[in-house]
Amino acid sequence: MPHRHCRDVPVLAVAPAGPEGLANGLWRLELENPGFTGVKPGQFAMLRPPAWGFDPLWARPLSISRALDDRIVFHFLVAGRGTAAFTRLAPGEPVTVWGPLGQGFAVEPGAPTLLVGGGIGIAPFVEYAATHPTPGKLALLFGHRPPRSCYPYDELGAMIAVESFQDKTPEDIPRFVELLEKRIAEHAGGLVLACGPTPLLRSVKNLADKHGVRAQVSLENRMACGVGACLGCVAENPEGHRVQTCVKGPVFWADKVTL
Amino acid sequence: MPHRHCRDVPVLAVAPAGPEGLANGLWRLELENPGFTGVKPGQFAMLRPPAWGFDPLWARPLSISRALDDRIVFHFLVAGRGTAAFTRLAPGEPVTVWGPLGQGFAVEPGAPTLLVGGGIGIAPFVEYAATHPTPGKLALLFGHRPPRSCYPYDELGAMIAVESFQDKTPEDIPRFVELLEKRIAEHAGGLVLACGPTPLLRSVKNLADKHGVRAQVSLENRMACGVGACLGCVAENPEGHRVQTCVKGPVFWADKVTL
Amino acid sequence: MDLRVDLGGLTLKNPVMTASGTFGYGLEFAPYGDLRSLGGIVVKGLSLKPREGNPVPRLAETPSGMLNAIGLQNCGAERFLKSMLPGLPWRETPVVANLYACDTLEFAELAGLLASAEGVAALEVNISCPNVQAGGVLFGQDPALAARVTEAVKARAGSKPVMVKLSPNVTDIVAVAKAVEGAGADAISLINTLTGMAVDVRTRKPRLANVVGGLSGPAIKPVALRCVWQVSRAVSIPVVGMGGISSATDALEFILVGAGAVQVGTANFLRPDFSFRLAEELPLAAQALGITDLSTFRGSLAVG
Amino acid sequence: MDLRVDLGGLTLKNPVMTASGTFGYGLEFAPYGDLRSLGGIVVKGLSLKPREGNPVPRLAETPSGMLNAIGLQNCGAERFLKSMLPGLPWRETPVVANLYACDTLEFAELAGLLASAEGVAALEVNISCPNVQAGGVLFGQDPALAARVTEAVKARAGSKPVMVKLSPNVTDIVAVAKAVEGAGADAISLINTLTGMAVDVRTRKPRLANVVGGLSGPAIKPVALRCVWQVSRAVSIPVVGMGGISSATDALEFILVGAGAVQVGTANFLRPDFSFRLAEELPLAAQALGITDLSTFRGSLAVG
Ligand SMILES: Cc1cc2nc3c(=O)[nH]c(=O)nc-3n(C[C@H](O)[C@H](O)[C@H](O)COP(=O)(O)OP(=O)(O)OC[C@H]3O[C@@H](n4cnc5c(N)ncnc54)[C@H](O)[C@@H]3O)c2cc1C
Ligand SMILES: Cc1cc2nc3c(=O)[nH]c(=O)nc-3n(C[C@H](O)[C@H](O)[C@H](O)COP(=O)(O)OP(=O)(O)OC[C@H]3O[C@@H](n4cnc5c(N)ncnc54)[C@H](O)[C@@H]3O)c2cc1C
Ligand SMILES: Cc1cc2nc3c(=O)[nH]c(=O)nc-3n(C[C@H](O)[C@H](O)[C@H](O)COP(=O)(O)O)c2cc1C
Ligand SMILES: Cc1cc2nc3c(=O)[nH]c(=O)nc-3n(C[C@H](O)[C@H](O)[C@H](O)COP(=O)(O)O)c2cc1C
Ligand code: FES
Ligand code: FES
């Protein structure tokens, strides 16, 4: 039985990420570590402040961005009511947290590994780079719209080779995809790991397929339970079976999931 | 048309009342004045922080304890979810407020007037004493369980003659009622105004009747709208008609309401 | 944006109406906004004789909702026509009288009385009030009875449009809707409250003196949307949607599934200026979504 | 406090069960508590053949509630018996199989298969699932059909108790309850979800691929309490209550209106240790209220 926990832990800190985080709705949240050990980067936790009452009803899934002895760190984008409510948490306030959940990214010490982060999809790669046995093999390609300072990009840059691309206009997107293709092609024989919006994951899947590179993608399906029980978060696999993203994913081999 | 307002105003301060307020669930809340003028002591406001979402659903009624040019002050007891949520308000956070609502207490400059406050029922008498044209005619009899410092008792004492009685055991209650009867009897020809738990109001009504003293009581019926529309808060009058406490009350002449 | 709506002969300047029983007789809300800005005002359910309603407690708060068992306390139709209606801006904003009675004869008499008043623009027939023991529930839960009441009211309503208000506490709401359409209803409004209950484990008593009551508010919005969608696809008369509407987006959701207009109920208790704000915000919210015309947006839900 | 309950032959050590479809096959929750501490485990609805269920989106959040249209995705009864059941502590905590089928023959076959497994303590017949187009809805909404399914299942269930799970989407739930009691049901569980809908005004599409879905969670608790109260007064077999239970007080409310035991559904999503905590807290909450014996408290609501 994997070690999982459900605990009420206090908020240690919550703040906009960088000087432009507030305007762009990008935040950083630190909670006391509820007992998470052996976290696999790419795994996530479900978070729910009891003060929510019943509205919003569900916990919200966030990727574990750092798991330290004393605390766990998340990076999040204000997408709606739940994440907006996270920004109003006060230090010391309890949050019910369960995890670590799901399958993390593959770690292959010998393989040149390209990390592709789209926007807040960069979050799990902080822990990935920090715990990878051979960080020299890692490179990050980061696509984003808000300024880079809103993301843990520099934190990653301190550990591994990083490269970023800012989408400012719709025309930038095909140019980003071109760059993406180039980098994926360069990783033939290696590994590509992606986290971000579905169109990005789709590009990664197709390009990896085209260039014969093994790739994993992390899905952000809507979740209610996070533990495989509600069957709400299913993704489809090529055989037409529907599998729970929360337990069989969120990280899937790109050729084992229909996007 | 009376001047009423519904506005979102910021919290100026919220804090336990005195050193023992926290332990006893007694708090003081200050909001920016939403435009209330000509408040009649005994009137109330409905309060609802938009951050509640839909749970709790209803606003909560609180007596206006002070109406100043720049702010309005409430004193409240943590009775359940809504009032507990009031204690977690942060300065600057908006609260939707409407009022001033209902009928206030009679003001008769020439009449010796006894104010009877039971616990947090003391709240409206602060404004009453502060705005009364002849405060020398006023006396307060205050019954309470938590320490006096949890209430605006000293604030009242600075303005008018006050006297308090602490219920520590069930046996204290009949002794308080004895004292109450004495004071009511002393006010023959005057006026008795009461706010507090229903059993207290019932005693005041019966004793006032017995001694032929005119009396008013302020009811705390459960309210949803506060404006006379939902018909949820009705009190019964001696003719068997059901009338809205929020518009015909909360202050009723004691002989015009069934308790 | 042209916000006008025609509800089977009743023309509103915008689709925002107030729901019966949640907006008093209208005047209670005058301090909080301009009644003339509303699309329509549906007043508290009226009966032939004044009624004192149920004993207290009549209300209970529930998760994102509330229960009520008011028991149709009202001042009676005559008093309403004489003392309340003249104070309402009925020339600018249609006033709809909501009718409650315990048998078809009474319904007919009430309809005749109310329809004859110049200031009453239309009638809304409450066949679904779950709070009163006798009558109400049964009419709304049986298509044949619902049709009979509709016919009785229509026969006495003269030229005034008749809207029939349906209960969601049925196995097949479409059957009831078709029955009242067949009986001549000019429009249908829905939903009335769901029958519910709340209890207090401390006192071991029901939280409502009437034991059961009607559930309303955001909690029931999903049920309401489903009913409006099912009914508006099945009938060809206009449908007025309600149940938990608490934002401009909510109102647009009801229009998207087919409602001609909407009624605001419980949200009037969240803040007394709610309906006025909604009337103001609705066109802005529509514009923000790129909706240029409510009539093409209406019922445009893309299914399958 | 003696917490044992007898549900028509099924004995539970305490009244806290998990509701079908919200607790997976049980093992998903093993990391968060001791499955043996629960009164009973009702597993995800099982059909004869594995089912892939509905396309996504299958879930939508609503005020204090949620909609689901899973479409009964499940691994099939055989796979459950072979691969899942052996992992459950069925000797210590009764495992109840929830049955879903599209006709009475299939129900009977499924009942035979599941009842013959030693680890299955009882059967719960889902005649009320509103998510699947064919079958489900109709059985639960018609007393005669409900009775036929009950008979068919009973005939093949051998000595295993049969609990029939009712839908609230009916005009008269008591009629359905009496029909299944008459057909031999050993117990009744209720309520299943209310049929609801949610839409997105931006995309103009339903929020569920299936358009309509089942509403559950705290929002529906008032409706559930009312149904349990009505049914438990009308039948003489035990009633298992559910619908929005999210605290020990909620569970006691259902017992107060007459439930023998309760099931926890949506609250399992609020935190995965919810049911374990409830089993622990229930006796403490009861004691705090001065309840010394659940059986005298049960159904003791003081009415009128
Ligand atoms: C495994 C996993 C890991 C995640 N990690 C992170 C992270 O590290 N940082 C981060 O910022 N976000 C992350 N997300 C996404 C995050 O969970 C959602 O943004 C959040 O749940 C939205 O909640 P809300 O209440 O703010 O928005 P809501 O008000 O609930 O919804 C706002 C809008 O977003 C849509 N939406 C909400 N949730 C999702 C979803 N999961 N997928 C697609 N659409 C959705 C809604 O339909 C709606 O249109 C992750 C999601 C998953 C499943
Ligand atoms: C006109 C008026 C003026 C008031 N002024 C004050 C004031 O100045 N200071 C103050 O502390 N309180 C005042 N109250 C009472 C206050 O409104 C309630 O205590 C509050 O609404 C309780 O909300 P809650 O969410 O904390 O409790 P809930 O969780 O809603 O309820 C807790 C318990 O209290 C009961 N309850 C809740 N509200 C009432 C009520 N109004 N009457 C009787 N029982 C109730 C509930 O049934 C429940 O058992 C006033 C009430 C009215 C009607
Ligand atoms: C306090 C209260 C009183 C009501 N009285 C009536 C009534 O007299 N006649 C009627 O047809 N509906 C009545 N209703 C039902 C509402 O008009 C409306 O159908 C229902 O509340 C659902 O809408 P909502 O969720 O927006 O409140 C009442 C509802 C409430 C909450
Ligand atoms: C995601 C989900 C799946 C469900 N699946 C089933 C099912 O397979 N069989 C069944 O009888 N009920 C099913 N239900 C209904 C629940 O068992 C329960 O009756 C309902 O949710 C009401 O209880 P609650 O409000 O506590 O959730 C499901 C409910 C949910 C939320
Ligand atoms: S979120 Fe419930 S199964 Fe994945
Ligand atoms: S609170 Fe609504 S009528 Fe008094």
Image (tube, coloured by chain):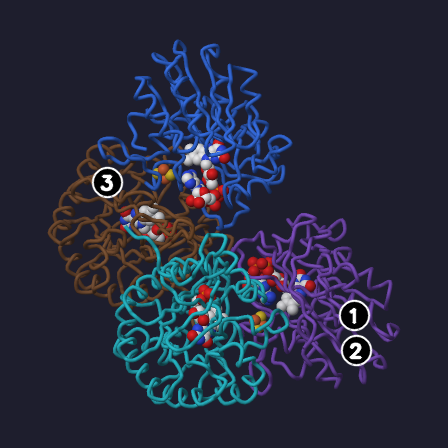
Chain colours: A purple, B blue, C brown, D cyan
**What's under tag 3, amino acid-wise?**
Glu
Depth check: D93 or C220 in front?
D93
Q: Chain of mark 3?
A: C
Q: For the residues marked 1 and 3, what is the alpha-carbon distance in whole angstroms?
A: 69 Å
Q: Chain of mark 2?
A: A
Depth check: C191 or A100 in front?
A100
Q: On the image, numbered disc 2 is attached to which residue? A: A107
Is C34 situated above or below B80?
above
Q: For the residues marked 1 and 2, what is the alpha-carbon distance in whole angstroms?
A: 8 Å
User: Nearer the observer, disc 1 or disc 3?
Assistant: 3
**What's under tag 2, amino acid-wise?**
Val
Q: At which x and y percent is residue A33?
A: 73, 60
**What's under tag 1, amino acid-wise?**
Tyr
In the structure shown, which secondary structural element does the residue marked by tag 3 occupy?
Answer: loop
In the rendered structure, find residue B49 and report the number of the disc placed on it. Answer: none
Q: On the image, numbered disc 3 is attached to which residue? A: C52
Q: At which x and y percent is residue D189?
A: 38, 71
In the structure shown, which secondary structural element does the residue marked by tag 1 occupy?
Answer: helix
What residue is shown at x 24% (from left), y 47% (from top)? Answer: C98
Give the left or right position of residue A54, taking residue B249 as reference: right
In the rendered structure, find residue A128 and report the number of the disc placed on it. Answer: 1
For the question of whether residue C270 can be seen, the reply is no
Contact (CB < 8 A) between labels 1 and 2?
yes
What residue is shown at x 79% (from left), y 70% (from top)? Answer: A128
Mark 1 or 2, nearer chain start: 2
Q: At which x and y percent is residue B7?
A: 50, 35
Is A177 situated above or below D282?
below
For the question of whether residue D42 can be seen, the reply is yes
